[in-house]
Image (tube, rainbow, N blue to C red):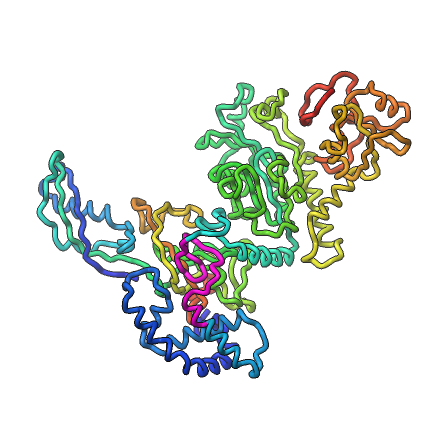
């Protein structure tokens, strides 16, 4: 509690060395101080931009000057680890003397600034460089070296606590929002069913009249956040603006225990329509991302776990071009225990388990992206697929997203039929390949079988995905497919 | 640092206040307008101690308003570079901690926190020495040294202080002092541990 005894400066441990150097430098410093005093007299007393050095030099107390120098010497010793044998003390003294003088004229590397002032030396910075991190504190900018340093220390800290990083998207991943004026008449019943805003920990449907919006949280989200927070340090990263992001964070995390200040909105991103890990203070090799939009993360596809979109409100379906009834119109909801969040939680637990318990190499060298790839590759392991009536003719098959998705899931894909083929993926049961599959008792499945496996991280029972005899209708899970 | 200085201000008064209580009206309006505001030059006006002199009123042409030059004495608070202050910690994160000394907000980055103090995250994030003897967390009192100041003509950051502080009831003047501080020097650091008596 007391200060005198628990002096935080490490001078107590290197007192002797500092005292020795003091004596050495005393003889040299007498030459430099008169110059400093001359400069001081010209400066305005109230000028804020004075160096602390000058202010103290103006004091005639030698004690303070020595103490200041002592502190600086101690600091420079910390910065230059090396042999301290008396043999090279002579050169070291010279080096330190130069360092001491130049520290006075600001040798600070300016690791970062807050409100335009370097937070290490207090100097006002003219040009602002580095990345802005306004979501941590307003006006904070960090230089690249500092970001790397912070990433490293944070990484060690988290690995010690057995945690990785998890970045969560908001819209269509954890919740679904709609503007009040976009509500259809069939959805009006929701207005009377909205949960109270006083205690948000149990509710899922919220009316935010002051933002003209209604928000529905995805089923299982509270349990998901609670369990994921034990394995991950979580961030929210949304393409909404900051007020929206903060409001949603309040709904998901009223006691600020999951996200705290780690809410990144589009105002914090460095690029306009892209999300990036440059504003995340974590190593890329330990970050997992949960998002429904692949295009937002083009540079970090290896860290991304794609989520099935949550369309609760009718406006959300319209937005993506689906003409079917939304969950609110059907007065139903996604299954809590078997929905997307529950499946993803199982996957996350598995990845976490493998990363910390099963990987053999050094903790710092592990990469969560490798683990992700490995887990993904187990979903359709052992399946050999042939596609029929799925790609347009003369389309290079191995560039199609379904082909690539199937390969990522661990299946092998081929163009030609042969006895080792296990599944034929088709949209029309009358094609030659489809009939071959029926004849040879191979699985004949709709392409949705692959997509569902991708979302649920599990091989689905093939009988749930029969191929339509007639042209398939548009449905909830269909992505843009080129039918021919 | 606190100062007791004489300032002057021109108060505009609406004719409805003319009458017996003219002086009282001027003084109460002055207090309402000035107390709690901040200027870059003088700092925060904490309280008006006395009114020295109210000059002759000048009627403005075209309106009925009258302008009175008022000289008053007040206590002001302004942070200076190199000053040593006591402050209360308001927020701790891995970059450092924020402390408030009345209306002044000071940020101490972890570069300027002694090396033996490490950040511990959790429910109550804090900085602790390796033997656990000294702890800096929310509501700790610390003595720190200011190494840089700046007047910020922007809104108060709502993330830092949730409620409107006592010193700015009207919320009239949106400027603030913002400082960078250090506790790495001798005799700086925690004064009072909130967990012990």
Nearest to the observer: residue A6 or residue A471: A471
Can residue A230 be seen here? The reply is no
Q: Which residues are magenta?
A: A100-126
Q: Residue furthest top?
A: A470
In the displayed structure, does residue A256 sit left or right of residue A363?
left
Nearest to the observer: residue A301 or residue A186: A301
Whole-percent x, y for residue B106 in the image:
40, 57
In the displayed structure, does residue A144 sit left or right of residue A388?
left
Q: Say which residue appears at 64% left-offset and 51% top-offset.
A: A164
Nearest to the observer: residue B26 or residue A369: A369
Work out whether A32 lies above or below A51: below
Is A339 within the magenta? no
Rendering quarter of residue A161: bottom right
Whole-percent x, y for residue A201 in the image:
55, 40
Whole-percent x, y for residue B172 in the image:
29, 44
Labels in figure, total = 0
Work out whether B92 lies above or below A279: below
Is A117 within the magenta? yes
Q: Say which residue appears at 47% left-offset and 52% top-offset.
A: A129
Q: Main secondary structure of the magenta part?
A: loop
Which quarter of the figure is the C terminus of chain A placed in? top right
Q: Say which residue appears at 57% left-offset and 34% top-offset.
A: A171
Whole-percent x, y for residue A217 in the image:
58, 34
Can residue A221 be seen here? The reply is yes
Rendering quarter of residue B144: bottom left
In the displayed structure, does residue A440 sit left or right of residue A378?
right
């Amino acid at each position: 509690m007391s200060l005198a005894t628990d002096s935080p400066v490490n001078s107590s441990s290197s007192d002797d060395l500092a005292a020795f150097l003091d004596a050495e430098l005393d003889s040299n410093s007498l030459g430099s101080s008169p110059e400093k005093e001359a400069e001081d007299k010209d400066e305005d007393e109230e000028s804020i931009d004075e160096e602390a050095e000058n202010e103290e030099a103006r004091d005639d107390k030698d004690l303070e000057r020595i103490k200041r120098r002592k502190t600086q010497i101690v600091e420079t010793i910390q910065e230059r680890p090396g042999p301290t044998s008396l043999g090279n003390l002579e050169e070291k003294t010279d080096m330190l003397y130069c360092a001491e003088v130049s520290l006075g004229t600001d040798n600070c590397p300016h690791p970062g600034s807050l409100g335009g002032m370097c937070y290490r030396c207090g100097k006002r910075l003219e040009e602002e460089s580095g990345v802005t991190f306004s979501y941590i504190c307003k006006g904070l900018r960090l230089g690249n070296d500092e970001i790397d340093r912070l990433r490293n220390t944070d990484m060690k800290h988290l690995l010690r606590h057995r945690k990785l990083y998890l970045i969560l998207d908001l819209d269509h991943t954890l919740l679904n929002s709609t503007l009040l004026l976009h509500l259809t008449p069939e959805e009006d019943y929701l207005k009377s069913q909205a949960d109270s805003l006083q205690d948000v920990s149990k509710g899922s449907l919220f009316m935010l009249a002051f933002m003209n919006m209604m928000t529905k949280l995805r089923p299982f989200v509270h349990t998901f956040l609670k369990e994921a927070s034990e394995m991950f340090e979580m961030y929210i990263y949304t393409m909404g603006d900051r007020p929206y992001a903060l409001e949603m964070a309040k709904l998901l995390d009223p006691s600020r225990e999951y996200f705290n200040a780690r809410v990144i909105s589009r105002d914090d991103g460095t690029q306009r329509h892209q999300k990036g890990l440059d504003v995340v203070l974590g190593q890329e090799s330990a970050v997992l991302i949960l998002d429904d939009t692949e295009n937002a993360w083009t540079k970090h596809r290896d860290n991304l776990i794609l989520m099935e979109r949550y369309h609760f409100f009718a406006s959300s379906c319209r937005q993506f071009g689906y003409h079917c009834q939304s969950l609110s119109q059907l007065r139903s909801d996604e299954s809590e225990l078997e929905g997307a969040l529950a499946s993803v939680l199982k996957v996350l637990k598995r990845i976490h388990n493998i990363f910390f318990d099963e990987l053999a190499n050094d903790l710092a060298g592990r990469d969560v992206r490798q683990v992700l790839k490995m887990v993904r590759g187990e979903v359709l392991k052992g399946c050999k697929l042939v596609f029929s009536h799925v790609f347009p003719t003369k389309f290079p098959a191995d560039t199609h997203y379904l082909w690539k998705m199937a390969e990522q899931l661990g299946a092998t894909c081929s163009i030609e039929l042969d006895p080792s083929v296990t599944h034929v993926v088709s949209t029309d049961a009358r094609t030659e390949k489809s009939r071959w599959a029926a004849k040879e008792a191979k699985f004949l499945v709709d392409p949705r079988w692959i997509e569902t496996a991708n979302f649920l991280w599990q091989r689905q029972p093939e009988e749930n995905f029969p191929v339509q005899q007639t042209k398939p209708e548009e449905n909830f899970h269909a992505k843009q497919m080129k039918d021919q | 640092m606190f100062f007791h200085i004489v300032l002057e201000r021109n108060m505009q008064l609406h004719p409805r206040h003319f009458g017996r209580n003219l002086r009282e009206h001027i003084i109460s309006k002055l207090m309402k307008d000035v107390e709690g505001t901040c200027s870059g030059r003088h700092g925060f006006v904490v309280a008006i101690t006395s009114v020295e002199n109210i000059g002759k009123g000048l009627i403005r042409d075209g309106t009925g308003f009258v302008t009175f030059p008022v000289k008053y004495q007040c206590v002001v608070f302004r942070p200076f570079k190199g000053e040593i202050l006591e402050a209360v910690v308001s927020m701790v994160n891995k970059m450092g901690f924020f402390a408030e000394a009345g209306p002044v907000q000071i940020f101490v980055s972890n570069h300027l926190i002694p090396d033996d103090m490490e950040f511990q995250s959790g429910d109550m994030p804090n900085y602790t020495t390796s033997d656990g003897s000294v702890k800096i967390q929310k509501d700790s009192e610390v003595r720190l040294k200011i190494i840089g100041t700046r007047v910020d003509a922007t809104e108060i950051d709502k993330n830092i202080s949730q409620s409107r502080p006592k010193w700015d009831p009207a919320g009239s003047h949106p400027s603030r002092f913002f400082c960078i501080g250090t506790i790495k020097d001798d005799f700086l650091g925690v004064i009072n541990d909130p967990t012990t008596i």
